[in-house]
Image (spheres, rainbow, N blue to C red):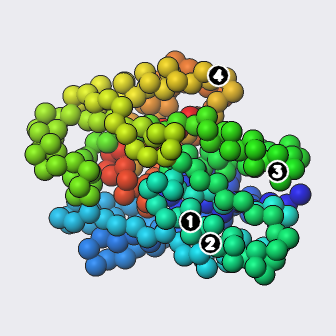
Amino acid sequence: MSFRVVIDSCGELTDEMKASGCFKAASLMLQVDDHNIIDDESFDQADFLRRVAASPNCPKSSCPSPEAYRSAFDCDADHIFAVTLSAKLSGSYNSAVLGMNLLKEEKPDAKIYVFDSRSASVGETLIGLKIQECEEQGLSFEEIIEKVEAYIDSQMTWFVLENLETLRKNGRLSKVKAFVATALRIKPVMVSTPEGEIAQLDQARGMNKALVRMVDSIVEKVSNPEQTLIAISHCNCPERAQMVKETLINRLHPKGVLVLDTAGVSSMYANDGGIIVVA
């Protein structure tokens, strides 16, 4: 059976996913002051980070329109899926559902399903790869939905921020707290909740200590590492990502570890120097 997976651009695609022809990105739009940026192959991370650092305002994002999703779903594939940024963080999921309903008005027999990742970034990537794995196993449309929803239930997302400016600008952190954290070099360790919201797990003084606490939590939570594919995305810090990868391999011996650069929306969330891990 042929299939298509539409992943909103908060999710990074590997080179193999791009080359397969089975995956398609639905681009979000980013805005820094009056400058609009399409989160697609043309995204310039270095330019975006410069603009964010220079602006007193918080960068914004807008999700793909229902029509954009409808167009992405409109293909000859037997099975069509979407994977979106957590519905608790973005309107992308609701937009994809509306796009699905638009296409179903024209093609009522189309087999389409929208997954709320309850995650972001490489969390979406891993869900896309799980769909591909299920398709290659020859599972039915209904079986794939069941397997992938169970996989999403089992996933957890961690991230550590080098820079607290975006949290300060969007009101999630007061100016005083941000100043104190910066002055004391406090780095928060953040996690996703089962509902797909963001919570603080821990904090540490200095980036290396925060990364150690994040890795400790990952090692504690991953119960079957030999069956677990872990994904890491980084915002402008490849050496840091490589260090986390090597530590996880040495401590967990997982099935595999992917490392990807953050795309536009993920770069906005992680900010310069941020690390995201999903397992």
Amino acid type shown at disc 1:
Asn
Label 1 CA crowd tier, 10 Å (few <14, some 14–19, many 20+): some
Question: Which residue is at 78% across, 81% downward?
Answer: 106
Q: Which of 100 and 33 lies nearest the eye of the viewer?
A: 100
- Other residues around mark 3 within 10 Å, as few (<14) / some (14–19) / many (≥20): few
* Mark 2: secondary structure: helix
Q: Say if mark 2 contacts mark 1, CB within 8 Å.
A: yes
Label 2 near label 4: C-beta < 8 Å?
no
Q: Which residue is mark 2?
A: 98
Q: CA distance from mark 3 to mark 1?
A: 21 Å
Number of labels in the image equals 4
Are the residues tagged 1 and 4 within 8 Å (C-beta)? no
Distance of label 3 from label 2 (alpha carbons): 20 Å
Helix, strand or loop for disc 1: helix
Whole-angstrom CA distance, mark 1 to mark 4, is 33 Å
Whole-percent x, y for residue 256 in the image: 63, 32
Q: Dot 1 corresponds to which residue?
A: 94
Q: Earlier in the sequence, mark 3 or mark 1?
A: 1
Q: Secondary structure at mark 4?
A: loop
Which residue is pictured at 45% across the width and 40% down the height? 192
Q: Are marks 3 and 2 in contact (CB under 8 Å)?
A: no
Q: Amino acid at mark 3?
A: Glu
Work out how far the residue at label 4 is from the one at label 2, CA to CA, in angstroms. 37 Å
Which is nearer the N-term, disc 3 or disc 4? 3
Disc 4 marks which residue?
224
Left/right of residue 171 with respect to residue 82 in the rendered view: left
From the top left corner, tell me how far across and down residue 66 is, in percent: 59, 75
> Disc 3 designates what residue?
142
The three-letter code of the residue at mark 2 reads Leu
